[in-house]
Image (cartoon, grey):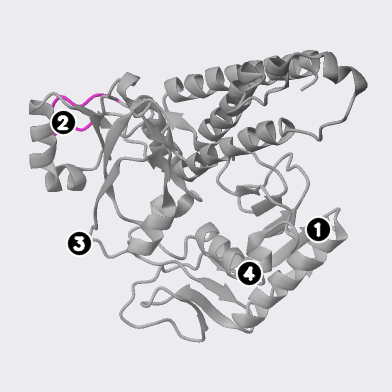
Amino acid sequence: MEFIQPLFLWGIGAVVIPVVIHFWHQKRGKTLAWAATRWLQEKNQQQQRGIKLDNLLLLILRCLVIILLALLLSQPILTGLTKPVVVEKIHLVQPEQLVVDNYRFELEEAIKKGEAVYWINTATEAIKDPAQLPDQRTFNPNVLQSAINTASAKPSELHLYVLNNQQLANAPFIRVPAQFKLHTMVDSASRPVRPYLKLPGSGNVFVNASNQLVNSTALSKGIRFQDVQAHSGRLTALVDFRDKTEQQTVLAALNALSDVYALGIQIDVKKNQKTGYDWVLTDQDVIAPVPKTLYVVSGKLKIPRVPNVIFWEEKLTPQTAERVRTGQLPEQLGELLIRHFNLKPNSFPLSQEQLNTLFITTEERRAQQPENIRNWLLLVFVGLIGLERWMALRQNA
């Protein structure tokens, strides 16, 4: 037997309390003289020697109640009764030729051993020959999460083979089983063409070779940029919140972002029908989103149906959002801006720290058997409490 909280077993020592109370109530009182005592026989006047235990069954019940309480708090697990969990190895592979070529030996060995090997696509197809890529090659974080959920429905050791690029970061996090191993590779041969923003009076906004957002009058040398800028003209934003505190918080964060990078964002708090907004931040539902507009909706937990509508579960106030309390809101808004205009191409790899933050392991559920044991102990504990109270009231002890 094992215990999750073994320190509570020290509580068993509290059984001395009912024993002490029991003897305390049975200590001998003072002898009172009574005239009729002279007629009693001498043998009945002799003092009894030793310890007399009255209500012994009641004492045992009270000791058992304390022992059971200590056992319940220590959360026992009978490991001998639980069956060992069979953990299956599962391999999920991104349908990319570079990934397959790089990990061909590992995948072929897994198939020979009879381990489950699947493509990461909407169908989660089983792989028979890694050399034959599937017809369906759609890959994004949603497809990846769906494939992980499908493949790891049972306890499994998951091996994930993917390209390390910014496409993975399009999701806030990806949940994986507790036993998880990530195999990534970087496409070093590709040299992406970077987009940039052309803003009036402030120059060019782009991501430089150090992977930082900058505003400069001249584009960096040694970096290939698109011939046509991703956006030309002034950036416009609509900040429309019912909650005035949230409205002020988002306005302050957006102004801070605009000042740091000299973006010169035009911010409206009331919608102008003649203005085509690049950015809409609100706590209200978006009915008909404009494809080229980035929407950030706070206080709503929903799965986005279109990539330009982003939902944040918490309300953006210091009392409800960690990103506001820590001052990270302007930085995160800047990341959304970079992602919306694709200023950081997908081929850029994520750092190890970013990968560790992106993939969140989920704890496996404990077996039901320990829970059942604790439930039975709880029933016995309640029964003993009821029996002890009934006997105590009946015997006035």
- Answer with left or right where residue 343 lies relative to residue 323: left
Q: Earlier in the sequence, mark 1 or mark 2?
A: 2
Of all residues shown, which one is farthest toward the bottom? 217
Q: Earlier in the sequence, mark 4 or mark 3?
A: 3
| Vertical order, 251 against 243 (above or below) | below
The dot on residue 46 is none
Q: Amino acid at mark 2?
A: Gln
Residue at the spot of label 4: 326
- The residue tagged with tag 2: helix, strand or loop? loop
Q: CA distance from mark 2 to mark 3?
A: 22 Å
The quarter of the picture where residue 318 lies is bottom right
The chief SS type of the magenta part is loop
Of all residues shown, which one is farthest toward the right? 35
- The residue tagged with tag 4: helix, strand or loop? loop
Is residue 348 visible in the rendered image? The answer is no
Residue at the spot of label 3: 189
- What range is drawn magenta here? 125-133
Q: CA distance from mark 2 to mark 4?
A: 48 Å
- Answer with left or right where residue 157 lies relative to residue 76: left
Please rate how many residues cluster around mark 2, counting C-alpha atoms within 10 Å: few if below 14, some from 14 to 19, many from 20.
few
Query: Residue sitting at 41 percent across and 30 percent down?
Result: 149
Q: Amino acid at mark 1?
A: Lys
Which is closer to the viewer, label 3 or label 1? 3
| Vertical order, 193 against 130 (above or below) | below
Which quarter shows the N terminus?
top left
Residue at the spot of label 1: 274
Q: Amino acid at mark 3?
A: Ala
The dot on residue 132 is 2
Please rate how many residues cluster around mark 3, counting C-alpha atoms within 10 Å: few if below 14, some from 14 to 19, many from 20.
few
| Vertical order, 397 against 391 (above or below) | below
